[in-house]
Amino acid sequence: MKNYILFLLVITFTFGCSNKKEMSSVNPENWIKRSIDISNMDSLEYGKSYLSIYSQIYSKSEHKTHNLTAMASMRNTSDTDTIFLLKVEYFDTHGKLIRTYFNTPIYIAPMQTTEIIIDEMDTEGGTGSNFIIEWKIPKNCPEPLFEGVMNSTMGQQGLSFTTQSKRIK
């Protein structure tokens, strides 16, 4: 009986103390591995894109929301040139900066993709969250493609949809 009570206490303590909220599934160390100095590459063209992301959507009425997992997919569409992302910022529905994923250049090799995942339990962005992505590409290089992929499953139902970025500069 003592062993049974001790076992229950250990299980309760172990799982009861894990209230840590995950904010993103992407480890910042991944960006450090991709860091690159582009200060001597003066012929690169600058761009800035807006990508809408939905970490929540309304369900049944404006008073009930449904949480989603959201992925910002950042793709190099060139099969020959490396592109560079300068900064990625995540904003909430009200335009408040939530977090900056990196603000030093990283590279994306030809045809390569990298992602940022907003976990389903991370609802800080709300129903109108978005990213601003600054980038540089070599002359005559195709522009990068930024897409949002949102999904959720509950029971036997699934929900998924996508968004595409819009160049704003």
Image: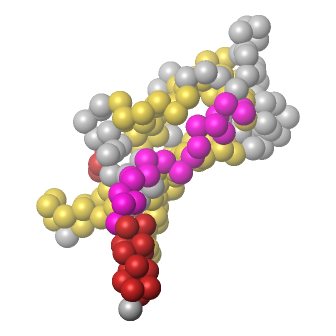
Residue 65 place in picture, x, y as percent: 24, 62
Give the quadrant of residue 27: top right
Residue closest to the eye, 8 or 21: 8
User: Does the magenta portion include 20?
Assistant: yes
Q: Residue at x 46, y 40 (%)?
A: 51
**Residue at the spot x=72%, y=33% of the render?**
33
What residue do we see at 47% from left, 30% from top?
100
Looking at the image, residue 28 sits to the left or right of residue 11; the answer is right
Residue stretch in magenta: 15-34
Q: Is residue 1 left or right of residue 74?
A: left
Q: Position of residue 13 (x, y in %)?
A: 37, 67
Figure colour scheme:
secondary structure
Q: Residue 41 or 103: which is nearer the viewer?
A: 103
Q: Is residue 122 above or below residue 131?
A: below
Query: What percent of the width, then of the height, locates residue 86?
Result: 60, 23
Quadrant of residue 153 within the rendered picture: bottom left
The reply to whether residue 15 is in sight is no
